[in-house]
Image: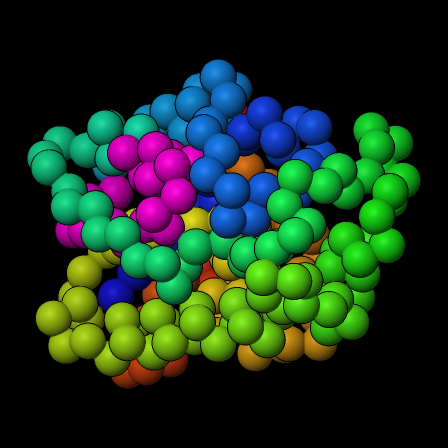
Amino acid sequence: MKLYVVRHGETVWNKLHKVQGAADIPLAPNGILLAEKTGEALKDVRFDLCFSSPLARARKTAELILDSQAGEVPVIEDKRIQEIDFGELEGVICFNDAHEYLNPEMEKFFTDPWRFKRPKHGENIADILARTKDFWDEKIHDPSLLDKTILIASHGCAVRALLQNVYQDPENFWHGCVPPNCSVNVVEVKDGQAVLLEEDKVYA
């Protein structure tokens, strides 16, 4: 099994440094362009199927990438790979253009995520690790998927949570950074063992 794990393209809220979590924000024009470039770069990869977060920015990124495929590739939505829900923090501006944090809880989220408290009506890091692990375990042990090449379209925090099943390093949750928009992480799974072949590749 080979997995291409992609973060969605840029949105207007990304540019404004706003928390978008479960908010269903569409791709910005630049996000569409980047997804199209990613699809062009991956056109020779023969995807068998795609799992996508149901949020529009991830689903549209998947569709734009798959537009470059020679044939039809089914897209299956799965809420377990949807972005972390920030609850009452949705829409908050995290930091300014100089990357100075404007919200103390969001500063914890990005700099010390295990101290990030579950917001009202939202999730914390343990929550998103649990649901993405449930998705991971189900897919890598599905006999029908063992020989498949799969696109996974998700979100920054959800991608890092999912890839913790490869990193096995929860204390270093962000693995250096938030994955850039439309970055691609390639993982090969054999006999239940996962190896990261490519990390945060951006085709710009």
Residue 30 location (% of width, % of height): 52, 20
Residue 69 location (% of width, % of height): 19, 33
Please name the residue shown 41% across and 29% down the image: 35
Please name the residue shown 61% across and 55% down the image: 86
State the residue in front, 168 or 45. Answer: 168
Please name the residue shown 25% across and 43% down the image: 45
Q: Quadrant of the N terminus?
A: bottom left
Q: Examine the rendered structure and indicate whether residue 139 appears above or below residue 156.
A: below
**Which color scheme is applied?**
rainbow
Residue 194 location (% of width, % of height): 40, 74
Q: Is residue 186 visible?
A: no
Q: Is residue 116 visible?
A: yes
Q: Examine the rendered structure and indicate whether residue 193 appears above or below residue 146.
A: below
Please name the residue shown 65% across and 39% down the image: 91
Q: Is residue 40 magenta?
A: no
Q: Is residue 46 magenta?
A: yes
Q: Examine the rendered structure and indicate whether residue 113 appears above or below residue 87.
A: below
Is 112 left or right of 178, judged from the image as shown?
right
State the residue in front, 115 or 153. Answer: 115
Q: How many marks?
A: 0
Residue 201 location (% of width, % of height): 52, 43
Is 74 left or right of 193, judged from the image as shown?
left
**Magenta stretch?**
45-63
Q: Examine the image and state in which quarter residue 170 appears.
A: bottom right
Q: Examine the image and state in which quarter residue 136 appears.
A: bottom left
Which residue reaches farthest top? 29
